[in-house]
Image (cartoon, rainbow, N blue to C red):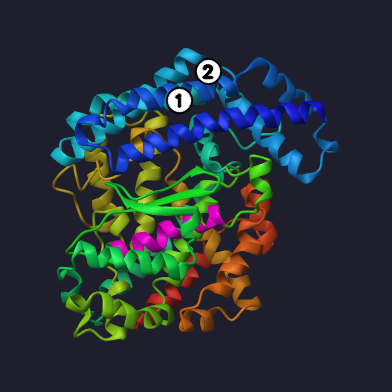
Amino acid sequence: MKELDEIKKHLQKEAAFADASRIVSFDQSTVCPEDAVEEKNEIIATLEQQAFLLRRDEGFLRNVRKVYEQKETLDEWDRAMVEQLYRNDLMERNISEERAYEYSLIEKKAFVDWVQAKEASDFSLFRESLSKVIEINRERSAMRVVAPEETWIKETYDRLLDRYERGMNVETIDPCFAECAERLSALLSRIKNSKKKIRIDFLSRHVSVDAQRKVTEYIMELQGFDPKKGTYSTSEHAYTERLSPHDIRITTHIYPDCFLSNLYTVLHETGHALFDQRQPEKNNEYFLYDGKTFGMHESVSRFYENIVGRSEAFLNALYPKLKELMPEALSDVSPRELYEAANLVQPSLIRVEADEVTYAFHIIIRYELEKQIFAGMLTVDALPAAWNDLYEKYLGVRPDNDRDGVLQDVHWSSDFGYFPAYLLGNFYNAMYVGRMKQEIDFDGALAAGDLTAVNDWMTKNVFEKADRLSPEAWLFALTGRSVTADDFMTYLEEKYGALYQL
């Protein structure tokens, strides 16, 4: 008990610096004046360095390793906390203070360079920083200590995958993604040959920023977002951030000529926020709020965005309020036309704007590129062309500029191994929705526009133990099965088969 008490006191100090770093970073990407953006990098790096030093404190780590050796004697909460800390120890054990600080500066510089390169649509402005980010990811992976029981880690890219989706590796993902790609190609081909015509002329109608902010606030309230524990802002790349245990922020990006973009961004990001807001309060006592993986998180955000948000029942329930808030866009549009337009399948260049069917290809493309990079098969200079070639191969479209191509995502300014979590999240939620439908009136809840029962089921079954279980154990507890692409593909084939009268 003495060591456990000391561990928790130490974690409280570390959390203060980590939270402060996230607050400054959120400011940097939302409301920070343009000329002050880069100077924030030094502040963030300094705060992250202090958090790193506390995590690497010898006395603290001695306590963690000692308690870990006795983990079988601990209760569920203490054991989960210590296992998470020990895992972090393995990842950072060989990284020096100086190198950790350098990593932070490289990543912050890369973010600034990425923003400038994207604005200018010029990959050359990001090339040097990207090369450094790839190198530090390779270096960090090589220094990661692999425990004897971590048998799934077999190559460099496995180490990157495991950082975001513990227990996941290429051997598991490859067959899932291959099945997904094969069945998607067949489905997309049938959709392209369908005679079904979907009206889309109204999708580009101008909707003011003010009106879309009202839509944002309405959707967040409808989803059950707690305004006492968070708020929203706008940023170049939408995301969700836990600034502290009771402060969960989301951002969106509002396009006046594309109102559906904001609608589905908010549904997605509020899904992430609900996962954090509705975690057990006891998680905060044991510092377990970072245990849930990115695939778990994406399963939730994409559940609210797509399975709920793009369903005909839910859109019918939303329709009257949306028409009230955006009359200029929907004055002559029927609920059915809105549903069909929201589910239009059309191969495109931009991942975050992709439809449900083609979205998976955007992830498969990034996964293939990342594997090639870390296998030494693809250079930074060759990356833009390789990106364009894969878009032409899988989606039949080819970027004619860097902004819509290799520069469209912020992720590579710091991380690799994250993208597969998006598609794994789709696999996960398609699997557990089957059980949800057996236990609550899911379709009735969507038709009523009342997500109370849905949120309560998600809280009890999906959210409750996510921070204390591995993805494999969590998914098995939910479904009794290991990850598969089959449920997701069956869902797409049935939904879009009906929509496109295949």
Residue 488: x, y in percent? 49, 65
Which disc is residue 95 wearing? 2
For residue 318, what is the image quadrant?
bottom left
Q: Which residue is mark 1?
A: 47
Answer with mark 1 or mark 2, whichever residue precedes in sequence. Answer: 1
| Nearest to the observer: residue 395 or residue 433 | 433
Q: Is residue 470 left or right of residue 108?
A: right
Horizontal arrangement in the rendering, residue 413 relative to residue 277 (left or right): left
* Amino acid of disc 2: Ile
**Image location (x, y in percent) of residue 170:** 52, 42
Q: Are marks 1 and 2 in contact (CB under 8 Å)?
A: no
Q: Residues within 10 Å of mark 2 (few under 14, many from 20)?
A: some
Q: Quadrant of the N terminus?
A: top right
Q: Residue at x 70, y 59 (%)?
A: 477
Q: In this picture, is 39 found above or below 114?
A: above
Residue 384 x, y percent position in the rendering? 23, 38
**Callout 1: few (<14), some (14-19), or many (20+) C-alpha neighbours within 10 Å?**
many
Q: Which residues are magenta?
A: 262-277
Q: Is residue 473 above or below residue 110?
A: below
Nearer to us in this view, 473 or 224: 224
What amino acid does circle 1 point to? Leu
Helix, strand or loop at label 2? It is loop
